[in-house]
Image: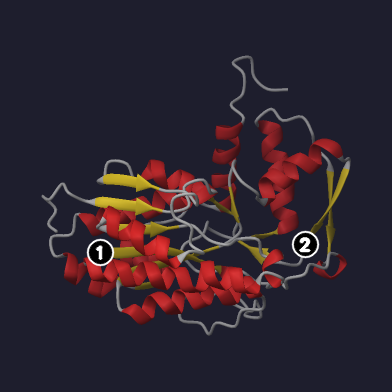
Amino acid sequence: MTAHDAGHTILVTGVSGQVGYELARTLQGLGRVVAVDRATLDLSNPDQVRAVVRDVRPTLIVNPAAYTAVDKAEQEVELAMRINGEAPGVLAEEAKKLGAALIHYSTDYVFDGTKDGAYVEDDPTCPQNVYGRSKLAGEQAIAATGVNHLIFRTSWVYGTRGKNFLLTMLRLGADRPELKVVADQFGAPTWSNTIATLTAHVAAQALSASDPAAWWSERSGVYHLCAGDATSWHGFASAIFELAGLAGVSSRPSVLPIPASSYPTPAARPSNSRMSNAKLAQVFGLAAPHWRDALQLCLTDAFPTSPGGHS
């Protein structure tokens, strides 16, 4: 398709999730956006996946839908693998048949967290839990089809919808004077809106390319897409209450640092989830905001202060 062809159709999955919800908005204006939730397109049902893609006939598929219950995945291995590992390959196969492209999301959990410094895209993967293994399998299934694709690995995703660390902290902080939070795992808390906005910029570049075949052949592959800089879960929690206070939220518990060993979870987490966004900046000319700036925007958005100031 050419830049003058207005007939772009973008299929967005998982629209009730935190990233899918934002994508359904940020992709507006780039073509006809067909946003589906699990009731319409269930990634655990490959026949349904194929049928929906064939019916919609998209130019571009954007797939934020995933099995994201990291600890539960340790028990539901087959389901996690079907949704995260196999379904992306089915989407990729169908996209390739249509001459469409696929944008998909992966995770910092494909790494083991033992590297000093930030991970880059071609660092060796070594997932430490079922969720990470299932997401890596999805990356590999997409690449194996040869479809035009972009895989964005992100980290520590939060927003004002669904289940995430931000909402958990705000809920617990309203009830408890003191919270103990892991201080020896590091990564970039990334707002769902940041992911969706940067994706929309990339999609706009792709859909307006004068030579789409050349554009995709030069750019297909894996990219890291997370907020700038990094912190610990403890640092993230502390910033949440500090910035929520500025936005008028009164609860401000004490946030105490603890080691991950004091808070065992069914799924092992990497101690270092830092990822470099340098390739994203170099190839697409896009820079993610600092994690703290994005968090402030998110909280200001969630809790607009009254005209008379805040408490």
Label 1 sits on residue: 100
Determine the secondary structure under disc 2. loop
Label 2 sits on residue: 183
Question: Looking at the image, is 73 positioned above or below residue 2?
Answer: below
In-image side of 245 versus 85 (left or right): right
Residue placed at 18% from the left, 59% from the top?
Answer: 209
Q: Residue 96's x, y, as percent?
A: 27, 71
Q: Is residue 49 visible?
A: yes
Of labels 2 and 1, earlier in sequence is 1
Q: Residue 233's x, y, as percent?
A: 72, 58
Pick whichever, 138 or 82, lies toward us: 82
Q: Is residue 110 visible?
A: no
User: In the figure, residue 76 lies in which quadrant?
Assistant: bottom right
Determine the secondary structure under disc 1. loop
User: In the figure, residue 184 lies in which quadrant?
Assistant: bottom right
* Extreme-top residue of the structure: 308
Amino acid type of the residue tagged 1 in the rendering: Ala
Q: Quadrant of the C terminus?
A: top right
